[in-house]
Image (cartoon, helix red, strand yellow):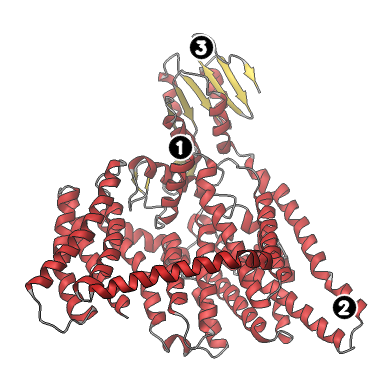
Amino acid sequence: MTVVKFGLVGLLNTAIGFAIIVAALFAGLNDYAANALGYGVGLVVSYSLNRNWTFSAKNQPSFREITVFCGVFAVAYSANLLLLTSFRAAGYVDQPLAHLLGLFVYSALFFVLSRYVVFGDGHSFARDLRSFFQRRRGDLILLRSNASVLAHRNLVFILAVMATFAILLLFTGKTIPVVIWDEGRIIVNAMEMRQTGLGLVTTYNFDPDLWNTKPPLLIWLMTGSMALFGPTEFALRLPSLISSLGTVLLVMLFLRRITRSVAIATFGGLVLAISGGFFGEHGARTGDYDALLCFFTTGYLMLLFFALHRQSPPFRWILLAGLFAAAALMTKSVAGGAPVAGVFLYILVTGRWRRPFTTPYYFIAGLLALAPLIFFLALRENAGPGYLGATIYNDVAGRFSEALGNHSGPPWAYLQVTFVNGLFSLGTAVLLAPFALTIARGRTRFALIYALCIAFGLLVIVSISATKLQHYYLPAYPFLAIAAALAVHACMTHLKALAAAGELSSRRASIMRIAPVILLVIAMAQSVQMRLNLIDPRLDYPGARYGVLLDALAAERAPLLLVDKGTAISIDPHYAPELRFHAMVARENGRSVEETSDASRLASVSPNTIVATCDPSLVSTLQAEFPTLLLQLNGCVARQKDPGGENLANRSL
């Protein structure tokens, strides 16, 4: 509870200090002055609350204690200042995010030193520290001695996980061009943040983005990935791919723990990995929010399942669930909390509704989950008024009351696309899973009920929303896979019992055990067909060709003007995020590239400028205005008035 109290004081102190820092930055103070002002106010609040409430000091305040407290503050503050200076040296100047990260470092140091040096016994700290390292040394020796045993015991499961990962990577395939609009806008958000530095405000065309109003966690991860691998499609999609692999691993770990069967864990992992809705657009294959969201929601939902089945669950379980939930909310705001409806349904169905009230841990985890999002919303609204209203409309009110972007459908739309159209690999066969409840026993039964409640609860929420997009139901896919695997496990266990009792011949039982394998093979064949006939053909889209076009023109040194009318949407009559992404990458590589949607600019283009387009409606216009064909490539053309030397003249590919 001391840690909890210190954390609550820290949240209050952080909120006050960070609010003062942000206000000072907007008032014109520089990094150091704003930082000193925020921490100075926080120091007074921290001493008073921590002394009287967190550590409940019995003695009277003394000059020595205040002096030591200030010294401890100086040490923690110096660490924060070092981090801030490092950010500035890296080019991130006057960025609120740098201050936020510094606050976490400062808080951790401040707690340890306050607990043991200011309000405690310094000798106790030395003993605790020595004991800690002794325990860790003993753990390391034990781990090394048991390493071979652990590896041997888990070798089959590790190989199964690796095989499932390999199949998911095969279905994901090679890096594809940027095709879908949502991904294109997110990628532009990340590219612009890469150029301006990490921050709270995502931008499009370097203006605050009030159309894509999701929190910036994915944008931060994409920016970090580009820092490692450069501005490529692979780097931008890497967070989604890793998240999808992580989700498959969570499903397999959960099933193995429930059933103690590697075969059932592998079945569930494969069912998820080969689902078109999971590996395709908005999933593992593209840089969108839903793969990352799916990983975080799956993590906290699984932890809550195990916690709800303990009278006194370990605090670390619920704390970790709160952290996963916070990350889910910071990924896609309210969508991160939507699956909790299934948890409430489960505790009502199983009569466990009293469990969350038997300990304050759930309440603390809820606060931990909500605090970052609330904190972010307040700061983001302060940075650009109007954001909060746009978020409420885009992510809650608007989506439920009207079909945004004309994405409408009947109430059974998700049943149609998920099960009938086959975005979930087993299709309608998974709808038979509830019938396995009649034969499921023990924790298999409870886990099956839980998975079905999560899937059904989320189905109800997304179905009552007026805006209907197939990827809204993606967080339910891991639990559909779990439900299918647990249903198979219940059936196999039942068949084994019948065979042991002599009510079913061993031969018939063996034949029936092959049924899940056959079902999985059929599902895999259908998923291959879906990728080849439904997902891959979408790559033949004009906006997806600009990357290849620019690569083909890489040897050209003349200025390049890319012309594309784009697509008319509610906020932009010439929306072309794919073109903007490729133009930004080209400019980062030192090339002179402009993009425009205004065809009238063609009349004033200088003779040596290369004009190119992949927009079919502009090909004939370029042909009339620019006589020299430099390149013709898969529907894209590059032309010029006066080539002025060696080039790709009249080259057709």
Residue lying farthest left? 63
**Of the image marks 3 and 1, the number of the one nearer the N terminus:** 1
* Residues at marks 3 and 1, CA–CA distance in whole angstroms: 25 Å
The quarter of the picture where residue 282 lies is bottom right
Residue underneath mark 1? 580
Percent of width and height locating residue 433: 71, 76
Q: Which amino acid does label 3 sit on?
A: Pro
Callout in the foreground (3, 2): 2
Tell me the residue at 46%/48% (across/down). Answer: 222
Q: Nearer the viewer, residue 460 or 154?
A: 154
**Mark-to-mark CA distance, 2 and 1:** 59 Å
Q: Is residue 142 visible?
A: yes
| Amino acid type, mark 2 | Ala
Give the image location of residue 479, x and y in percent: 61, 71
Q: In the picture shown, does residue 606 fall above or below 209?
A: above
Q: Is residue 581 above or below residue 119?
A: above
The percent coordinates of residue 553 (x first, y second) are 54, 23
Q: Please name the residue that numbered disc 3 is placed on.
A: 643
Q: On screen, 237 above or below 355?
A: above
- SS for dot 1: helix
Which mark, residue 509?
2
In the image, what residue type sits under mark 1? Arg
Q: Distance between the residues labelled 3 and 2?
A: 76 Å
Q: Relative to 283, is 522 on the left or the right? A: right
Which is more foreground, mark 2 or mark 1?
Answer: 2
